[in-house]
Amino acid sequence: MTRRGSLKKLLQVSGTVAVSALSGWPFSARRSVWAKSEKKKFIIEGLGQTEGYAVKELTEKVFEAAGGITHFISRGDVVVIKPNISWARGPKLAAATNPEVLESVIELCYNAGAKKVRVADNTIHDARRCFAITGAGVVAKKTNADLIFPRSSLMKEMKIRGDRLDVWPVFVPFMEADKIINLPVAKDHVLSTLTLGMKNWIGAVGGRRNALHQDIHQTIVDLAQFFKPTVTLIDATRIMTKNGPSGGSLSDVAVKNTLILSDDPVAADALAAKLFNRRPEQIGFIRLAQKQNLGTYDLQQLDQKKVVL
Amino acid sequence: MRRVSQTFFLLLFLVLLIESRLPQDIYLKYSTLLSSEVDLRIGWPVKFFFQLDPLVWLSSLVSGHHLIKGFGWALGLLLLTLFLGRIFCGFICPLGTIHHVVSRFKPTLKGERMVRANQKTPSQKVKYFLLITLLLAAIIGLNLFGLLDPISLLFRSLALAIFPGLGVGLKELFDAMASSDIKILNQLSYTAEVLVSPIFGYGYQAYRTAWFIGLIFLVILFLNRIRPRFWCRTLCPLGALLGLCSRVSMLRLEKDDEKCTDCKLCTKSCQGAASPIPGQDWENAECVACFNCFNACPEDALSFKLRWSRQMNKRPDMGRRAVLGGLAAGISLPLLGRLDGQVHKVSDPRLIRPPGSLREKDFLRLCQRCGLCMKVCPTNVINPTLAEAGMAGFWTPHLIMTQGYCEYTCTLCGSVCPTGAIKEISVKEKIEQPIIIGSAYLDRGRCLPWSGNAPCIVCHEHCPTSPKAIYLRMATVPGPDGKSLSVQLPYVDLKKCVGCGICEFKCPVKGRPAIRVVAAGESRSPKNQILLGF
């Protein structure tokens, strides 16, 4: 019955695949909205300091501080969430986005009247195993969100127009979303120093991804100027401090009980970098991103708030 | 009744075959201390037909001295055969059903020619010859039953050749639809893929030598044009075994010579060429219990009766030559299989067996070459061998790391192996023992940072062990333009490497990856080691 249910759902998915991916107009449209917003951008740090705080409550509070989820998600929106669930590792190892955070965000979106919430990631390990072992599968089932499995027919060549990447296959659900929420986990990374929000877009493209490492910082920035999320929520409830990005041992994990929400992808990464005791300007892709005007790591320029639970 | 049973078992076989893969709807509760060490298993009893197959039970017993799990089904079937003859062939065997259908729907032979084709021929002794050969070879130590066992043959052919073949064809179609500019086609392609991929596999599996497996299957189907159920009559070793058991069966064909008008309709419809016509002796061992003759007879001259009788049924017509030939071949085959030295002297570096595999000698005694492990593997890394395991190991499973890799926390292959050639292991065992399937080595000439061509850490990043078996050292190397380049260079720590092959699979150096895995260091073999005291 569940299979029939999911088939039905996926039929609906393909039915609602409405906006033409080829024309690319939704992106240019979003870009213009971006340009218009003269308003100061915000960054919110949520901290769970009390013993046994609820991750769900912290997530809600963080969104409330930003003006409430309805500020970002409108009634009838198709929302695509991009967690980082690339590795088939259990939630405790901090290799993947905390399923509790994922669950709360999906619920918030539905409460805001989203028509459909989809969870999409082009995983590194086998997707079935990743979705199962990271807990994303059960969250999607519980909350009635769609899990989008990476398939060759869902990768479409798009003009990225970056410095290094000109045309590259992109995971189609992101092209067809009304709103995109970037929901990465904060981790150490052997080549790019850290993997945070902007690097998460490597999981939204297909093709020869293993070649991206030859110029990792520029490719991250190329992708970050292409994918413009409505908002970035960095899950730093548990972070991987070494042996990243795959880790595999509890000794690689530090509990930080932190969530970072921002509409400035560079600022979100910059604040998260501080959790690792790193200066944002020393991280290649953060510096490059500011240079290309994707945002700023100077947090003073933003409307900063802190939520403590 | 027979058709209902045949349809049921054929469908059951197909459903189990299709379900022999990791499903998409696995939901694990993450709240209950979910760790990576979850043993994902397949919910369907995908081993059922192998447990039902007496040849699998018998060959594992005489060759590997191992009683397979669930062999009770096979004993039950043998018991049933003692009462009802080759009822398995007529009512259950999915391969038999396929032959039956093919023979029936496209009969090339009409009228008198069909009657002639259904006369018993001496070639029907070949199956006894094959049975004796395989049995003797298995006892001596070379278990080749899987090549000819109908269940293994059918599973291998469908799972590795026919289904992937259709799947690839469909994929081409969907990709063409997805890349077209017509939007409705894009949507249709996605919908169709969602509907079709649970059957043909999510990743569009491909298997080495699959064309050969498929070709043999098609040839076997084509043989039905020469004689109906050519395979069952002439070649099937399981048919031969069941035929031998049916000697004492209660099921008897009783012929009424008085009523017979010699219309030959019974012979014309006989699937087993078992001489049903009155006036000839009924070949009880050849009869596949399809009851066609009984239904075809317009005079009611034939009837099947269940009755004990003092004297046994007619002896199966094996022929002395088939028996002696079988014995001779059975003795020589294992010797021939050793001539290439693969089992005892050299071991091919590419012969990387699935995690949990027994030692090579024991492995070959048990492996049925059925392809179940290859079908369930989520990354498509397990492939049939061609020459890697020598003649004795033809079509046994091995891992091709350019096609996939062994997932660190996956233990599916062992959990479905019907004979235990691949032991069922838990993720915990796999990681903690650890179970090593090979070891990686670097090709510094091709490696991007080592050769000064570009920075790259892909192998290190993907290495799943903790701590990682691939480590990096900062160094300066000369670049192509003479300037020195500061890069991180990868090294392999052989003490930590488990040979999973994800480094080779993900390495961006195409063609021949710059990091490769060989079988040396595999924990199943004490001989095939590199390090001292490990």
Image (tube, grey):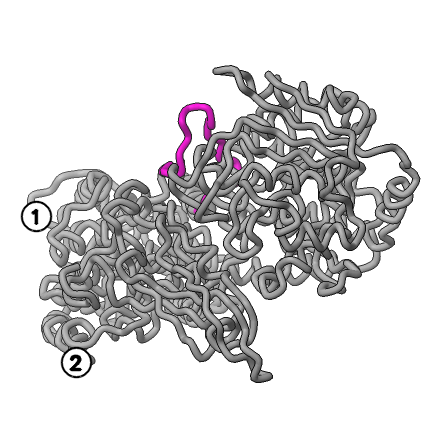
Task: Decide: is A8 above or below A157.
Answer: above
Q: Classify mark 2: helix, strand or loop.
A: helix
The three-letter amino acid code for the residue at tag 2 is Leu
- Please determine whether, in this image, residue A288 is positioned above or below residue B391: above
Q: Main secondary structure of the magenta part?
A: loop
Could you tell me which quadrant the N terminus of chain B lies in? top left
Q: Please check the rendered image and state whether residue B31 is part of the magenta-colored stretch, yes or no.
A: yes
Q: Residues within 10 Å of mark 2 (few under 14, many from 20)?
A: some
Task: Read off the residue under disc 1.
Answer: B311
Mark 1: secondary structure: loop
Left-right relation of B228 to B131: right
Please, which residue is most extreme toward the left here?
B310
- Eye-nearest disc, 2 or 1: 2
Q: Position of residue B355 (x, y in %)?
A: 30, 54
Q: Compute the Cα span from label 2 to label 1.
A: 47 Å
**Residue assigned mark 2:** B339
Residue B166 in the figure: left or right of residue B496: right
Mark 1, chain letter? B
Residue A202 place in picture, x, y as percent: 63, 52
Q: Chain of mark 2?
A: B
Label 1 amino acid?
A: Gln
Residue B15 visible? The answer is: yes
Q: How many marks?
A: 2
Residue at 45%, 65% in the rendered image: B474
The span shown in magenta is B21-39
Q: In the picture provided, is B224 more to the left or to the right than A43?
A: left
Q: Is residue A122 magenta?
A: no
Q: Looking at this view, is B315 or B131 the one in front? A: B131
Which of the 4 image quadrants contains residue A191?
bottom right
